[in-house]
Amino acid sequence: MSDFDEGRTLADRMRRHAGSADHLYAHLIRAMADDWETEGPVRDVLSGWEDASMGSVVQLRLLAGVFRLVLTGRAPELVPYYPCLGGKAPPELAWPDVRDVLVRHRAELREALEIAPQTNEVGRSAALLVGIFEAVRRTGLRRVRLLEPGASAGLNLLVDRFHFAGRGWSFGPSDAVVRFDDGVVGPVKPEPFQVVERRGCDLAPVDVTTAEGRLRLRSFVWPFHLDRHERLSRALEIAQREPPRVDSGSAGEWLEAQLEQPVAADVLTLVWQSITRQYWPSAESRRVAAALREASNAIPLAHVSMEYPRGSGTAQLTLDLFGAAGGGQGAGPQHLADVGDHGPPVIIASTDP
Ligand SMILES: C[S@@+](CC[C@H](N)C(=O)[O-])C[C@H]1O[C@@H](n2cnc3c(N)ncnc32)[C@H](O)[C@@H]1O
């Protein structure tokens, strides 16, 4: 790591992450950096992590551990600082109480450092929906098999259980508890479709049927992102009734195995991925691409992807249609929309190919 890119010490890297933002986590991260330098409890809890890179965001791992204590009632004095729990106390006053919690729960918080941040952003289903509409429209195939590598808890596999609406269109059950109004900007061409199978994989799948899995997902959503907490809670309600199947495995190997499964000729296999490619080693990306190419000769296949293009901070929604799925083979991915980090707004890029 270069000093210039990463900061000289862990405290520098933490301060660089927090910047001058005014929210709870920025205040806490700056306070943690000061405490680390003055050899307070943060220095002790983070011992062994002194050389942690910016990318490992050790401060967020620690804050997620603290958040889990708050969510499970073991740090009640912090509730007033957590807006998602109704807290309204000024965030700049939180540090002394957090510091006490670090001391009291040292062992558990050190274990928390081992858990890399992992979220499952339900808002990204708005992008998936746009991709499905377009793939269905172009192929005429309305029976969809959804496959998602890097699915986390698989909440976006429940896209047809959510309700979406925009100017002149709507989709999904009218009484759905997860709702997106005006999450898509620009012309939308809704198409009826039926999900006939849904399945995902993840290196570290989150099981939404367990309290631990649900707690883990909640703890990585920043406590002042109220909309995201609300959406996640509601999606978890649906998922507990109908848990998405998420296998443990790596993207390429899993996709190869799934795409070898027999599937009816009138079913469109749609592979969806969001904000996972950046974590894949290049061999993984190559293996996923090869699995798609290989299967494209045998089945109607679409690939809908929401990822950050190299060097860009704006995620792009793309659609690639393969082989029998509409003569798109060789055309490469088509840019459908620009997408916010957590989904809405999904800004449609163009109307027709
Ligand atoms: C930022 S999360 C995104 C999760 C989900 N796609 C979403 O948009 O909410 C990235 C996910 O990719 C998973 N992941 C990373 N590398 C992977 C790999 N090689 N194979 C499968 N999953 C992987 C991580 O475990 C994590 O759950």
Image (tube, rainbow, N blue to C red):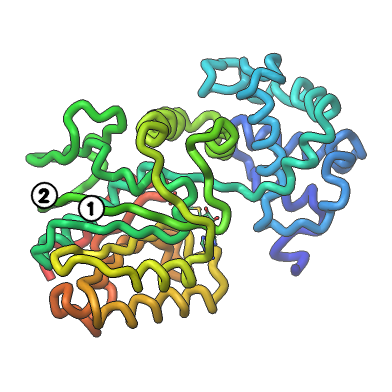
Of the residues shown, which amino acid type is indicated by label 1? Answer: Val
Image quadrant holding the C terminus, namely bottom left
- Which structural element holds mark 2? loop
Left or right for 246, reference 134:
right
Up-down relation of residue 300 to residue 192 (above or below):
below
The verdict on label 2 being within 8 Å of ligand 1 is: no
**Residue 168 place in picture, x, y as percent:** 7, 40
Q: What residue sits 55% from the left and 35% below the top?
A: 222
The answer, for residue 127, to whether it is visible in the render is yes
What's the distance in space between the residues labelled 2 and 1, CA to CA? 13 Å
| Residue 239 position (above or below residue 290) | above
The image quarter containing residue 323 is bottom left
The residue at label 1 has a CB less than 8 Å from ligand 1: no
Residue 133: x and y, percent?
A: 17, 55
Rendered location of residue 334, percent (x, y): 25, 71
The number of numbered discs placed on residues in the rendered structure image is: 2
Whether residue 221 is visible to the viewer of this picture, yes or no, is: no
Quadrant (top left/top right/bottom left/bottom right) for the N terminus: bottom right
Q: Nearer the viewer, mark 2 or mark 1?
A: 1
**Residue 294, percent from left and from top:** 33, 82
Dot 1 falls on a residue whose secondary structure is strand
Residue at x 39% of width, y 77% of height: 291
Q: Residue at x 48, y 55 (%)?
A: 247
Q: Dot 1 surroundings within 10 Å: few (below 14), some, or many (20 or more)?
A: few
What type is the residue that disc 2 sits on? Answer: Pro
Q: Which residue is mark 1?
A: 196
Residue 192 - label: 2
